[in-house]
Image (spheres, grey):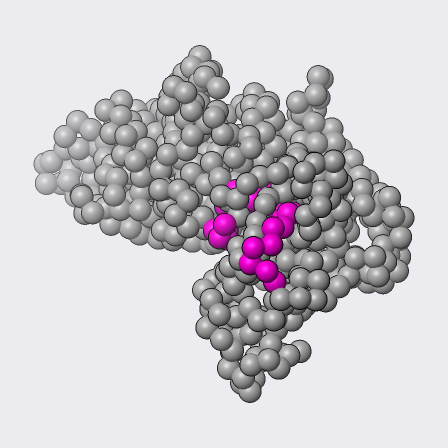
Amino acid sequence: MALNRRKFLEKSAVTGAGVALAGAVGAPAAQAAESGRKPVKRYSLTVMGTTDLHGHVFNWDYFKDAEYKDAAGNAQGLSRISTLVNQVRKEKGRCNTLLLDAGDTIQGTPLTYYYAKVDPITAKGGPVHPMAAAMNAIGYDAVALGNHEFNYGIETLRKFEEQCDFPLLGANALDAKTLKPAFPPYFIKTFHVKGAPPVKVAVLGLTNPGIAIWDKAYVQGKLTFPGLEEQAAKWVPKLRSMGADVVVVSAHSGSSGTSSYGDQLPYVENSAALVAQQVPGIDAILVGHAHVEIPELKVVNAKTGKTVVLSEPLAYAERLSLFDVELVFEKGRWSVESVSSKVLNSNSVADDPKITKLLKDDHDVVVKYVNQVVGTATATLTTVEARYKDAPIIDLITKVQEDVVRAALASTEYASLPVIAQASPFSRTSEIPAGAVTIRDLSSLYVYDNTLVAKLLTGAQIRAYLEYSAEYFVRTAAGAPVDVEKLTNANNRPDYNYDYVSGLSYEIDIAQAAGSRIKNLTFNGAALDDAQKFVFAVNNYRANGGGAFPHVASATELWSESTEIRTRIAEWVTAKGVLDPKDFASVDWKLTRDGTPVF
């Protein structure tokens, strides 16, 4: 895990072409000349940024086998971003621009899954990752590590790093033994300016501390991830002492100051604004991880009073952030006079034919793969109502997880314990149509690359788990009208942090206060015994503390595997041949108000 210093130093020494930065001496300089003062030199630099690309190279929905469309008219894909980047470079001069990304690059679509697992880039003579090929062709300067970079293990990440013509930055991704950076912490690019000293721009890369939880199986004992604020405080002064005139942070961390993992880590998950507020010397921050659009957010540094500009482009290559940095040369040095930012919409341009041609073969292979038929469904299954009604399509997930875990523990001391399982309504639009069932149908049901873990929990712990899950619903008085669009996501909890639990029967009384909603909780027809032990089949994200559900992260682990739950679902359907709800569907829970069913 040692830092490849030769490669890092070579990349950090990259310089821009020896051409003047855009921006001639303007009116203030002319006024200075008239007054007899030496003209002030002013120059402009443009920093472009993407984030959370998640393997989106084209405006294509692999799950629907069609062009991507949404109600807002967004378009996706690096080939659109390439067109926007080309336009900006033409306008500003390529030698006056920098192109960055804030992470989550190699996970998120069947395309990225295929080149990690089906035809892996790690195989001898394996392919070049399509994301590396595209980002090399577009000309990225540096990319921060995202948490999803670690989903396929360190070997895959290192191979991807090797295939990239740009550094993967992570100042707070440290070797667990030496506590030294395991990846390049920063990147410096020198822009030569005609008639003036060069401008040095430093890019500090920061990633998410949550990796220690979410990908514990891969990183424990190998890597450690301290907080963004403390590492920025360490590195920004160093970059300034190295002569950096501009410091930009590329941070795979949202701006809200919140964490999804509760108090499991002493570091904030979404700390980009805290970095801006607490660490002097930063001019701009490219924000990632949160999947929200922030054209421009101004944060005042508490120590210097200086404004730091943050921008987060929408995920999946739907937006490109643009930071316009105005510099002035006075008293023998460059300083940043102002920074402004905005986002460009990729739906305003066409695909770059260069990128389309480059990746067409990779894309076509994956389209063929996901359209393989693996079974036949007797009825249409959908997630449209799954967040507020017990839907058979989610029962399919829990049934597969139960079967896999039960088989895995069959010859162990835990074989006689009852197996229950959790699953979340990830999507509101997934559908497995009646008739032929393909890999893409099943992939749309389980969009994440989660794997399966078996934990040992008691009845009391399961009850607490269900109460926490039930906080997802908005308290609604008995007799009050019910609007399903306003019934869920209380306190902005996302759908993926609401869990079904199979193998039990229970009611969720949404007229009650959070913490007192689980009613009539039974197992095998009798009231749940708090001392009863259960094997809990759970995805690795939840098992490692994702969503901050109680008890599960600290519970004894009985078994785990590296095969994706999505793959297990495909195997289960393939083995059955026929997907019939009678083989997996059951009504385990329902919403009530004072004992009366809501639906």
Is 310 placed left or right of 564 in the picture?
Answer: left
Q: Residue 470 magenta-drawn? A: no
Q: Which residues are magenta?
A: 528-551
For the residue pair 215 and 478, the one nearer the viewer reads as 478
Q: Is residue 488 above or below residue 545?
A: below
- Please give the name of the residue rendered at 37% of the width and 34% of the height, measured from the top-left corner: 226
Q: Quadrant of residue 9?
A: top left
Q: Quadrant of residue 27?
A: top left
Q: Is residue 551 above or below residue 331?
A: below
For the residue pair 497 and 147, the one nearer the viewer reads as 497
**Residue 380 at x, y = what percent?**
82, 62
Q: Is residue 535 above or below residue 203?
A: below
Q: Quadrant of residue 134?
A: top right
Q: Residue 538 magenta-drawn? A: yes
Which residue reaches farthest bottom?
479
For the residue pair 234 and 563, the one nearer the viewer reads as 563
Q: Is residue 300 visible?
A: yes
**Residue 236 at x, y = what percent?**
28, 31
Is 287 placed left or right of 31 in the picture?
Answer: right
**Residue 310 at x, y = what percent?**
36, 47
Q: How many marks?
A: 0
For the residue pair 566 and 452, the one nearer the viewer reads as 452
- Please give the name of the residue rendered at 79% of the width and 57% of the height, measured from the top-left corner: 584
- Please give the name of the residue rendered at 53% of the width and 48% of the height, measured from the top-left corner: 552
